[in-house]
Amino acid sequence: MESGDIRTIAQRMTTSLLSSRAVNSYGSTVRIAVAPIRNSTRFIIDKDIFSKRLRIELNKVAEGRIRFFSQGMGQETRREILQAQDKEMWDASVDEIATFIARSNTVANVQNPLRVAVIPVRNTNIIGMNADSFTAILRSRIAEKSQGKIQFLAREENGKVIGQILSETDLRHLGMVESSRNNSIASVDFFLGGEFIAKSLSKEKAVIMNEASVGTSKDDPRTVEVSAGSSLRRPNTETYLNVLLIDAQTGVIPVEKMVRVEREMKSGLAKADLLLTGELSALSKGSAGGDRSDYVILSFQLVDPLTNEVLWEDSYETKKVSNRSVLYK
């Protein structure tokens, strides 16, 4: 296959595709996912060059009627962009929760300040979330938004605030805490807690990326250096935080708010209308004189991903003859 063949293939397939009923039945825009082309020939060739050239030609001629998905290059940079955007959304999510709690009927309509103890935020099925930092920021924002209607108790050391308050309540029932002052210290109106939730049917775990390299030293080429490192990456899943205001006496949750804190990096392939794939095949024949002929056919198929039906198919055929020299000794 030569460069002229590749250009001819792209032009012919573009004309055939744009005039096909499979593409025109989708109206103004059709989204196509590209699957790798299978090479069934004896040739060592970059088989993806055919689909790349066809994609370029279609984008140029179709003028937006056909949309493709980025399925290779730039995905790591895209991940960094989405993570940076999620971090910028963090403050907005905290403000959204704090405003919701402060404006709720449970808080807005009280006459006396509510006494709230913070309990640790849990991770249900995801790790690597800094729950302590979030709790500290959220508590500060709620105190600001509530304008004095919520007072936080600073005794949640080591996450044992519930046991501590229950112990004080038991002592009060036993008559060991009698003064009104001590009774007031022990009382709590609400617990503020939360839970990180990953949108997944199974438990999500962090992925540990191990990297190792062996090579000569830059300072001394006579020596060999070995380096190793590892990094922790959270799973690619949509993550939510559910914040609860829990009545300390009844366990009722009068105020509850869920916000998204991390997005899943989606490929977009779920929106694909059609699947474009192909196969490079050849029939090779050699003669005793050293000549060799190859009948080559490159076929493309447009497949409905739901029904697996082939809605369009076209091909390009060529024949190549080569001479294999013979060495006599």
Image (tube, grey):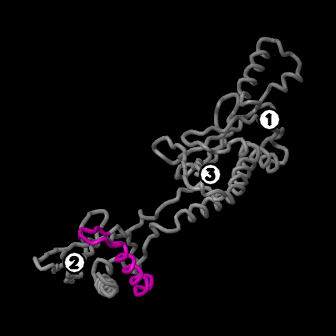
- Residue 245: x and y, percent? 69, 39
Residue type at mark 1: give it: Arg
Q: Is residue 64 above or below residue 84?
A: below
| Frontmost residue, 224 versus 315 | 224
Q: Nearer the viewer, residue 282 or 156?
A: 282
User: Which of the two labelled residues, at mark 2 and mark 1, occupies the earlier sequence position?
Assistant: 1
Label 1 element class = strand
Q: Note whether residue 319 is visible.
A: no
Residue 142 screen position, x and y as percent = 77, 47
Residue 259: image tag: 3
Mark 2 and mark 1: Cα distance apart in space: 77 Å
Give the residue pinned by disc 1.
Answer: 115
| Residue 274 location, quadrant | bottom left
The stretch of residues the image draws in magenta is 37-64
Indicate whether 323 appears above or below 35. Answer: below
Please give the name of the residue rendered at 73% of the width and 34% of the height, measured from the top-left corner: 190
Residue 163 figure quarter: top right
| Tag in front: 1 or 3 | 3
Q: Position of residue 94 (x, y in %)?
A: 71, 52
Name the N-terminal-most of marks 2 and 3: 3
Give how far apart the Cα atoms at labels 2 and 3 are. Answer: 54 Å
Q: Secondary structure at mark 3?
A: strand
- Tell whether position 62 is magenta: yes
The label number, if any, that marks residue 297 in the structure image: 2
Q: Does residue 251 appear to the left or right of 311 in the view shown?
A: right
Which amino acid type is shown beneath numbered disc 2?
Ile
